[in-house]
Amino acid sequence: ESSLLKSKFRACLLGSSIGDCFGSPYEGDIITSGEKIIIQRYFDKLEDPNFKGPYKQYTDDTAMMKSVAKFLIDKPEPDYKFLAKLFVTEYFKDPKRGYGQNVVEVFHKLKNSKFDDIFKPANEQFLGSGSYGNGGAMRVAPIALYFYNKYNYMLEVATNATKITHTNILGINGALLQCIAISQALLCDPETKIDPKVFCNQLCDKMKEIEKVDEDDLDATQNAYQEKLKIVENLLEKKHDDKLDEEVILHLGHGISAYESVPTAIYCFLKAQNEIPTIDTGNAFRRTIQYAITLGGDTDTIACMAGALAGAYLGEEAINPILAKQCELNKEILELADNLFSAREGL
Ligand code: 8NA
Ligand code: MG
Ligand code: MG
Ligand code: MG
């Protein structure tokens, strides 16, 4: 039904930005069990209707996701030069939003070359190997929503939108995995519990197609995400204790590379559909974001990706409006989601 779909669009983009805004104060931290209690209180406060504090500010994750949404809304056909200009304009308008080092260099090169070849600057980074950061994945949500029923085209657009800044195969495939996971979550009925095994296996089958390479290309990264998804599945079967979080960090990661963060976000999303002993809330959306943050590391980006998945699955009813109001751009993000939904009509 179209009202459920619209609610999922709104919750996906809002969930993404909530994860970014709430996770950002903890970015780069190692979270001890004492700090997990502090994070529980932090969320309790954010849900308290009497709590008055400054907005939680958004970072590069939301800034770039906004540009991707605009790119789809404003033009009938994907125009990647337009997207590159949106990224660069947004960056120079407000550069202090925690962008990655490499990506800033790409923005300068794009600007100085007058957007002559928009894929060239990213291609030149890291001695030609390109960035494997999670920047492509953190901003991919609008593409997953917009093209959720045009699978092959969705992959093409997500690939090109990523390659403006990230050309390493791990950066691209990480963005594709997050994109596929969102479109899959979007199609799940929020009234029915997701079977994590089925969800992971579906993702794994799709990554098998994507990671398929020439037989003579024995690149060690060719099964990278399929292997990670198997670890996700295994970890989801284990009983929760403090040691398990350490295992998650060790085997899935919590870093700024796509490889060490996209599977982690998927794990957080699936795990949080059930109770987690260290997190006191009955709300699966909050649990997803809060759990992602308690893993530490690249908290804003992992919570952003996990939040997009939870929103796409659960819809807007699952997001406490009091909590959402603490997020700097909450109104603007919902407007973007509505415009994205409308722009799809006739597609
Ligand atoms: P990016 O493309 O600049 O990549 C991020 C970083 O990953 C780079 O600066 C490098 O250090 C490293 N990296 C990526 N590819 C390679 C490679 N091929 N060889 C060696 N090193 C490489 O930025 P992005 O857009 O992917 O963003 C990734 C993360 O950085 C996001 O979390 C974003 O919020 C940002 N960020 C993270 C932190 C943090 O402490 N976790 C702090 C500030 C910014
Ligand atoms: Mg960020
Ligand atoms: Mg940041
Ligand atoms: Mg980050």
Image (tube, helix red, strand yellow):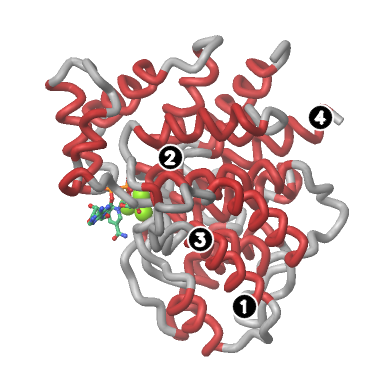
Identify the mark at residue 62; answer none if there is no mark.
2
Query: In the image, what residue type sits under mark 3?
Result: Asn
Looking at the rendering, which quadrant does residue 269 occupy? bottom right
Mark 3 and mark 1: span between their CA atoms? 19 Å
* Nearer-N-terminus badge (4/2): 4
Query: In the image, what residue type sits under mark 4?
Result: Ser
Q: Are marks 3 and 1 in contact (CB under 8 Å)?
A: no
In this image, 114 relative to 66: left or right? left
Q: Are marks 2 and 3 in contact (CB under 8 Å)?
A: no
Mark 4 and mark 1: span between their CA atoms? 35 Å
Callout 2: CB less than 8 Å from ligand 2: yes
Q: What residue did someone put label 3 on?
A: 223
Mark 4 and mark 2: span between their CA atoms? 24 Å
* Quadrant for the N terminus in the image: top right
Q: What residue did someone put label 4 on?
A: 3
Identify the mark at residue 156; answer none if there is no mark.
none
Of marks 2 and 3, the one in the foreground: 3
Task: Say whether residue 299 is visible.
Answer: no
Image coordinates of residue 152 in percent, x first then y, are 62, 31
Image coordinates of residue 125 in percent, x first then y, are 20, 42
Residue under the point 62% across and 41% down: 12
Mark 4 and mark 3: span between their CA atoms? 38 Å
